[in-house]
Image (cartoon, rainbow, N blue to C red):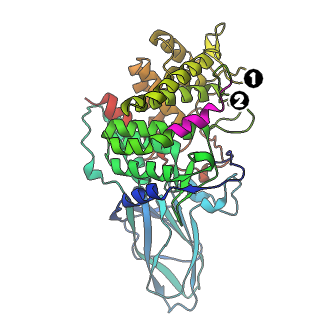
Amino acid sequence: MAQTNSLRDFQMTVHSEFIKIAEELKPVLYSRELSPEAARLNGESLADFRGQSLGQGDALLLDFGCHVTGYVSFDFASQGSPPDAPALLEIKLGESQAELLQSVDSYRGNLTASWLQEERTHIDDFPSRLGLPRRYAFRYVQIRVLAISPKYRLTVEGSSVRAVSAADFATVLPLQVQDEELKRLDEAGLLTLHECMQEVFEDGPKRDRRMWLGDLYLQAKTNYAAFRQTELVKRCLYLFAGLRQNEGRIGATLFIKPKLQVDDIFLFDYALHFVNTLHEYYEETGDRATLAELYPVALRQIEIAVRRMDDGGLVQDEDSWWCFVDWGEGLNKQASAQGIFIVALRKMLNLAEVLDETSDEGKLKALLEQAANGMARLYDKEQGLFVSGAERQVSWHSQIWAVLAGLLPEDLARKLLERLPELPHAPQTPFMHHFYVEALLKAGLRQEALSHLKHYWGAMLADGSDTYGEVFNPQNPHYSPYDDKAIESRCHAWSCTPSYFIRRYFAD
């Protein structure tokens, strides 16, 4: 994620009692050893790569058969005369083969090239074992010999990866479904989530390798339906609550290493997703003690969001980026923000009722009515659509969040969603496509929701991936908010929710 709204005069407040709870919940990572399943030398397939010799300019491509996150190692030896000089190697790791074609030198994207998984290293002694110290996320590894003495050749005797995750596939209940396509979609969703479950729910094991609150909201949903590691969700909630920005704001993202740190990025919708995540955590676990402890933190996010409302209950629009919603050039986010605020208000009201916070109940009901009136101001009767911003922009996003806000009768919600294909500004990410499927289900369009799962997420698998990526537009497959597809994450947290939908709504 880039181009975000950073707080001026940023300060972090550490709530040590929450951090202590979070650290006690740190998971022990499962590990497993994996070896390559296939290899090619200079483009030619090999029956067995071990012992193959490489000279200057040769390239060996290893395919581990599926996406893995972990620590890779190699065993090298030499062939011919005694080595009289080191071998200089370039090692590239990619979630896709296309990623291996990119290099730091030629990269022109708008995120730093340091995210590209590329190493150069010397091998001085043979035989030698090389273990890369960084954790990588990849399926493919390419070893290219950049320079070597003509007196000898390098041989690759073996390679393996110690794959790590907080999730264990053995804990997942078998999927009860006959549809083979749904099984494949579920497998990819599980693998996507599995790779992102580390010491926290990361947004991507390749990039950014930290925790974003919007991603956590969708990861937690899928986790409840799959791995059921509720304590990892609890840990993440306490970390967000324990590392807050100015005035008690929940930051959009946290760094875990080298130390716990909230970033200075604040996003209107992500802060409200803390309310949503806490609400669903309580619904799933019935953990009243955690709810009671974190309730004031959630309520504070509502109080901060209210400042953006005008006297008519409408969230104010402005030029700076204060609300994410989705990637998409020129997308106005006012109507989406209004819908997200209403959803969070409903869930906050429910939490207040659970804890019998009667004084808060009255205030929240009044705010909900005020916000509903604000949403009504955005409805254009002539067009029969919700508009957004001073230019009264029409988009998919505004209609989707209007439906999710729960202010429309089901027949009107259906009509609104059925008109989406004719509208501009379609969703660019699986993040927003998730909410589109939620809206379809809320409007009773179950078959349409199922068809969209197969069409949208299925197209990612048809593109050769076994996990779901960060950004995907089937009509414009080359689109990237970073101006380069190689820097994108092909295994991204907010994309894992087909497993949630399939297991909660479409299992036999």
Q: Is residue 19 above or below residue 118?
A: above
Would residue 179 be counted in the magenta stretch? Answer: no
Residue type at mark 1: give it: Ala
For the question of whether residue 205 can be seen, the reply is yes
Name the residue: 38% across, 61% down.
164
Q: Residue 300 location, x and y as percent?
A: 54, 39
Within 10 Å of disc 1 (Cα), the crowding (few <14, some 14-19, many 20+) is few
Within 10 Å of disc 2 (Cα), the crowding (few <14, some 14-19, many 20+) is some
Q: Is residue 223 above or below residue 441?
A: below
In the displayed orientation, state which residue is furthest to the front.
359
Mark closer to the chain start, 2 or 1: 2
Would residue 303 be counted in the magenta stretch? Answer: yes
**Contact flag, marks 2 and 1 (Cβ < 8 Å):** yes
For the question of whether residue 476 can be seen, the reply is no
- Mark nearer the viewer, 2 or 1: 2
Which of the numbered marks, if any, corresponds to residue 317?
2
Query: Where are the magenta residues, as a range?
Result: 299-310
Quadrant in which the C terminus appears: top left
Q: Identify the main secondary structure in magenta.
A: helix
Provide the secondary structure element on which disc 1 rests.
Answer: loop
Residue type at mark 2: give it: Asp
Q: Nearer the viewer, residue 98 or 370?
A: 370
In the displayed orientation, state which residue is furthest to the top.
382
Q: Residue 301 location, x and y as percent?
A: 55, 39
* Image-based side of 112 in relation to 460, left or right: right
* Image-based side of 318 in relation to 190, left or right: right
Provide the secondary structure element on which disc 2 rests.
Answer: loop
Say which residue label 1 marks.
390
Name the residue: 55% across, 29% down.
340
Q: Nearer the viewer, residue 453 or 354?
A: 354
Q: Is residue 80 above or below residue 413?
A: below
Q: Residue 303 location, x and y as percent?
A: 58, 35
